[in-house]
């Protein structure tokens, strides 16, 4: 059986969760390797949406329903990915959260969805997180990258505290990426973060380049 | 020209007449108000009990500093004030729960997080727009300031934002994309309540009604222009018609943070007079573009950056930016100068005073 990945990609893009589920199940039943279904069927659809989101062709509501559709497909693949000898290419581990005092999380959630959609292993530790929380999670999950988000000018200085804490703990091998409405690349430079993600799709590209720089 | 009252200055400017300098309408978070009060040797006024408290509190302090406008809004009524549930969790009359995180109250729980049907919306105990004492603070402010100052009736979080405060932002956005019926019932229910509050404030004598919902993000629209035109535009048009049925001459302002370039013309088309806050660092929202393309149909309100300039800029940078903004946006009137949101605790008192001085001393 041949899977029509173009159609599956389109269902992911349009956020049609029941259709995605149906097609993923068909592919599994047909014995298609799960890693292939994930890569060609789900991730490819989401990455088109990521680009369109970046260019204001698609907007937040469409990204949310697409992420939900993608998740519906992933849920079916997950148990198989865990047991099967087939190994999906693991891109890297990201720990992400909003900083202390900041409970605004839609930007962080969009980055999480896009990064998961691109094949990263993402641990979303939630909102209002301290330097301790970030360090603990980084060690627990063996993170490659920390993502920090803040909406407010009054909470963003805390990012510096977290960056300094990682330096103090000698966790220099973990890259720190920041984002949020008042953040820019100059601010990232000022606080010695490793990068700034202006939007969800660009953040994912940044994660990818940080991981490949690390590998080489 | 120099003997204008603040109200005259504001209304002349909003009728696109040239004035000595643009009217000012600064609003503050409580922490910034405390710092300024201490600096000015004035007693600190506790914020009023309203979802819009930052826009209507500390008016004594702000008019003394040089505000030309005074904000009013509906407040929590006598029988359901905002109350403390436990520790630092508060609940307001809508049933929204907030947590005190030190500098702000942030959402803790959405009362209709599990709503899925129109019945869920219909059966919810919604606030009564005409509840006892809802308008007492507004009346007091009108009595005290109404003759001399322009009265701005605040009706931000008009329905889209209040709707997501009820169910959660992601849930509402997804439901709109999936065209779930309950979501439209929710928007209409809230719009009905808030429109009545707005109409009452206009009837009481407001000069400007300042409605709003954030449709922009730092880099573009939050929802697609198509969705906005289908879902929001007709509803906002209806609201504006209700406002004008009370007072055909009411000036209508709309607040939306972020970059909303694609829908500004639509707003003008349905009768908007004043666009706020034209967030300076949001992509594309330049004063030159706005004045050139929409200056003939809209007045502007806001325009002073609070994401970098006010908290981190120098006095000199503030002076320069104030002059630049007035030169462009204030040409031939049509501009209320203001920070693009409430001034927060991270802005030095010196910078706030520099802002007022720069406006008051403005020379072409």
Image (tube, rainbow, N blue to C red):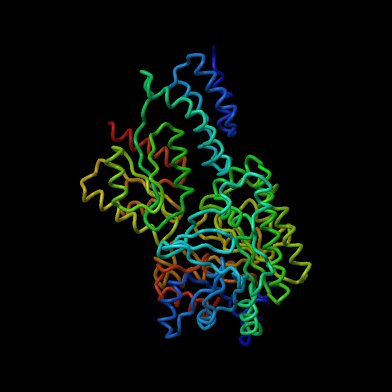
Task: Say if residue B3 shows up in the picture.
Answer: yes
> How many marks overall?
0
Q: Is residue A152 above or below residue B345?
A: above
Left or right: where B257 falls relative to A118: right
Q: Is residue A212 above or below residue A22?
A: below
Residue A216 placement (x, y as % from top left): 27, 31
Residue at x 36% of width, y 18% of height: A85
Q: Is residue B182 above or below residue B67?
A: above
Which residue occupies the extreme top position in the image?
A: A1
Q: Nearer the viewer, residue A210 or B110?
A: B110
Q: Quadrant of the N terminus of chain A?
A: top right
Residue A140 placement (x, y as % from top left): 28, 40
Residue B137 placement (x, y as % from top left): 61, 77
Residue at x 55% of width, y 44% of height: A60
Task: Say if residue B330 shows up in the picture.
Answer: no
Q: Nearer the viewer, residue B1 or A62?
A: A62
Residue B290 placement (x, y as % from top left): 61, 60
Q: Nearer the viewer, residue B191 or A158?
A: B191
């Amino acid at each position: 059986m041949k899977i029509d990945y173009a159609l599956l990609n389109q269902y992911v893009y349009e956020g049609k969760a029941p259709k995605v589920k149906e097609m993923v199940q068909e592919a599994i039943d047909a014995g298609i390797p799960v890693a292939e279904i994930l890569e060609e069927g789900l991730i490819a659809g989401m990455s088109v949406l990521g680009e369109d989101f970046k260019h204001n062709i698609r907007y937040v509501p469409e990204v949310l329903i697409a992420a939900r559709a993608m998740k519906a497909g992933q849920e079916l693949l997950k148990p198989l990915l865990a047991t099967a000898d087939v190994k999906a290419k693991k891109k890297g581990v990201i720990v992400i959260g909003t900083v202390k005092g900041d409970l605004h999380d839609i930007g962080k959630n969009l980055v999480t969805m896009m990064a998961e959609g691109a094949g990263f292993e993402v641990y979303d530790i939630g909102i209002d997180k301290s330097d301790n929380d970030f360090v603990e999670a980084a060690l627990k999950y063996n993170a490659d990258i920390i993502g920090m988000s803040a909406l407010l000018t009054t909470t963003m200085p805390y990012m510096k505290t977290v960056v300094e804490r990682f330096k103090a703990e000698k966790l220099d091998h973990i890259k720190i990426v920041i984002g949020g409405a008042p953040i820019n690349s100059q601010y990232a430079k000022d606080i010695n973060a490793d990068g700034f993600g202006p939007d969800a799709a660009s953040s994912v590209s940044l994660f990818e380049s940080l991981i490949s720089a690390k590998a080489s | 020209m120099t003997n204008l009252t603040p109200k005259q200055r504001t209304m002349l400017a909003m009728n696109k007449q040239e004035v000595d300098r643009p009217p000012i309408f600064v609003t503050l978070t409580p922490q910034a108000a405390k710092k300024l009060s201490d600096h000015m040797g004035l007693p600190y006024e506790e914020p009023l009990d309203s979802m819009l408290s930052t826009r209507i509190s500390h008016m004594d302090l702000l008019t003394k500093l040089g505000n030309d406008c005074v904000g009013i809004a509906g407040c929590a009524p006598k029988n359901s004030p905002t109350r403390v549930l436990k520790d630092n969790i508060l609940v307001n009359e809508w049933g929204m729960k907030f947590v005190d995180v030190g500098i702000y109250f942030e959402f803790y729980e959405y009362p209709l997080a599990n709503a899925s049907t129109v019945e869920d919306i219909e059966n919810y105990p919604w606030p009564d727009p005409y509840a006892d004492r809802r308008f007492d603070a507004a009346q007091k402010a009108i009595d005290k300031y109404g003759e001399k100052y322009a009265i701005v009736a605040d009706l931000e979080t008009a329905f889209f934002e209040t709707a997501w405060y009820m169910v959660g932002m992601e849930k509402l956005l997804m439901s709109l994309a999936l065209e779930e019926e309950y979501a439209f019932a929710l928007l209409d229910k809230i719009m009905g309540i808030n429109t009545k509050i707005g109409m009452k404030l206009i009837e009481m004598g407001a000069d400007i009604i300042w409605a709003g919902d954030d449709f922009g993000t730092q880099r573009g629209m939050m929802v697609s222009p198509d969705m906005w035109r289908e879902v929001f535009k007709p509803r906002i048009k209806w609201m504006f018609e209700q406002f004008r049925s009370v007072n055909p001459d009411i000036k209508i302002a709309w607040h939306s943070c972020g970059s909303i370039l694609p829908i500004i013309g639509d707003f003008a088309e349905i009768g908007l007079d004043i666009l706020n806050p034209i967030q300076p660092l949001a992509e594309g929202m330049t004063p030159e573009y706005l004045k050139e393309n929409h200056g003939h149909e809209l007045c502007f309100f806001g325009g002073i950056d609070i994401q970098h300039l006010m908290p981190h800029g120098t006095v000199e940078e503030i002076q320069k930016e104030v002059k630049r903004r007035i030169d462009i946006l204030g040409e031939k009137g049509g501009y209320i100068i203001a920070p693009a949101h409430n001034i927060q605790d991270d802005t030095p008192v010196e910078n706030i005073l520099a802002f007022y001085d720069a406006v008051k001393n403005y020379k072409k």
